[in-house]
Image (tube, rainbow, N blue to C red):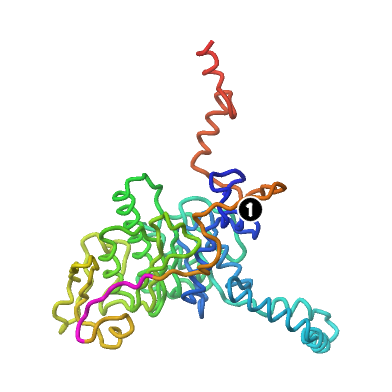
């Protein structure tokens, strides 16, 4: 998110720099949390494909620093204003000062009261990432088996034992998030396929470290056969929903799949040595006929129905399945304040507008090597010496 960009008129792009976020994608995670309450009772989080670190920055400010954003932040601000007008904060401060005794640390104690202890956040990416408070960054490949023990050691460095098997981690994870996406080519079929493979890589790693009941959030590209991917996720998660944050451009095919209630099948042992999608299949418990593969039916109105086999009546009611059947359609939700800024619209800038510097300059941009080679050739932003000689 540089100083000059073709998206300089995007409201969320400018708002991110004003509020100190590394990228505008931070608002996507904030709006997902506001809709699904992702951070409730969460102390161990893994952020995959984390660079440049906007989602890790959200985790650091919300889980470690105790900051509130969105509607929760607005309600807190309203409460503080109301307490200030009614004089509640002043009396509370005097009580805290009296209770503090002679150490005089009452004010600092009040500010740090909402900070959470024991929170572990690990960010993984192949690209380097600038450090963040309370976040352990790893440069690793999410598809390589050696990444799992490195991650577990970063989550629990004091009690981690290398002798423990990676398939049964000693420190299970509450939430795994992934905002990774490939460099799009403009060929939608190819981009959707590559993104689905990236999601499978993130899912396979999540299966190795998620605790029962854990959550998984990842970016997807909506395409023709994305419904089959939702059905496959439904085999290992109790609830699968698709969300489109307000800060995500409507012109983009991206969305986010939110999976809750991790429930691995009995006898399933996840491993990156033999990941799902590479010839492996989930074990099917005895006595569940027709549950091997989901079937798909396209209705006359174009709606795709997925048959997941034997589903409980309780889940059918919860997910909107008709009574007596097992037809399931992934719910699609719009999250965030729908009356807020339109990410596809352009807004007029005031004449005295000053462009802000980026919050965090790129650490290793893809074009860095090209710039170095251009400078070595004698050019910076204009023609190189070689080009000038040829023209002469």
Compared to 253, does 369 lie above or below? above
Give the percent coordinates (x, y) of residue 81: 73, 79
Q: Mark 1 points at which residue?
A: 359
Q: In which quarter of the image is the C terminus?
A: top right
| Residue at the spot 58% in from the left edge and 53% down from the top edge | 347
Residue 139 or residue 235, whichever sits in front = 235
Check residue 326 for magenta coloring. yes
For residue 210, what is the image quadrant? bottom left
Q: In this view, does 196 lie to the left or right of 286?
A: right
| Residue at the spot 64% in from the left edge and 71% down from the top edge | 65
Compared to 33, does 53 lie above or below? above
**Label 1's element?**
loop
| Residue at the spot 59% in from the left edge and 29% down from the top edge | 381
Give the percent coordinates (x, y) of residue 106: 79, 81
Label 1 neighbour load within 10 Å: few <14, some 14-19, many 20+: some
Q: What stretch is highlighted in magenta?
A: 324-332
Give the percent coordinates (x, y) of residue 206: 38, 68
């Amino acid at each position: 998110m540089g100083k000059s960009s073709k998206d300089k008129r995007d409201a969320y792009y400018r708002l991110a720099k004003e509020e100190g976020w590394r990228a505008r994608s931070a608002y996507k995670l904030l709006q997902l949390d506001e809709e699904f309450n992702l951070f409730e009772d969460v102390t161990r989080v893994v952020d995959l494909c984390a660079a440049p670190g906007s989602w890790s920055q959200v985790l650091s400010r919300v889980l470690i620093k105790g900051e509130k954003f969105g509607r929760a932040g607005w309600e807190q601000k309203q409460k503080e204003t109301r307490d200030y007008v009614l004089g509640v904060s002043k009396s509370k401060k005097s009580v805290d000062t009296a209770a503090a005794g002679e150490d005089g640390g009452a004010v600092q104690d009040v500010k740090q009261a909402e900070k959470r202890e024991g929170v572990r956040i690990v960010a993984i990416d192949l690209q380097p990432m600038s450090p963040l408070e309370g976040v352990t960054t790893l440069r690793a490949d999410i598809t390589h088996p050696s990444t799992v023990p490195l991650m577990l050691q970063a989550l629990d460095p004091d009690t981690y034992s290398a002798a423990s098997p990676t398939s049964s981690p000693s420190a299970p994870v509450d939430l795994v998030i992934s905002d990774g996406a490939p460099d799009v080519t403009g060929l939608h079929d190819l981009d959707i396929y590559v993104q689905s493979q990236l999601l499978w890589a993130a899912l396979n790693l999540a299966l190795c470290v998620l605790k029962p009941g854990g959550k998984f959030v990842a970016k997807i590209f909506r395409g023709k056969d994305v419904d089959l991917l939702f059905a496959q996720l439904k085999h290992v998660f109790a609830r699968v929903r698709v969300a489109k944050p307000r800060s995500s451009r409507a012109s983009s095919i991206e969305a986010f799949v939110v999976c809750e209630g991790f429930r691995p099948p009995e006898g399933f042992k996840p491993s990156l040595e033999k990941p799902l999608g590479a010839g492996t299949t989930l074990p099917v418990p005895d006595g569940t006929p027709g549950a091997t593969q989901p079937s798909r039916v396209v209705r006359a109105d174009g709606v795709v129905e997925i048959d997941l086999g034997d589903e409980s009546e309780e889940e059918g009611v919860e997910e909107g399945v008709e009574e007596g059947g097992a037809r399931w359609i992934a719910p699609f939700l719009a999250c965030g304040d729908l009356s807020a800024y339109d990410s596809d619209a352009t807004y007029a800038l005031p004449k005295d507008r000053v462009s802000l510097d980026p919050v965090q300059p790129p650490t290793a941009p893809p074009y860095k090597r090209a710039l170095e080679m251009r400078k070595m050739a004698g050019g910076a932003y204009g023609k190189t010496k070689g080009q000038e000689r040829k023209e002469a």
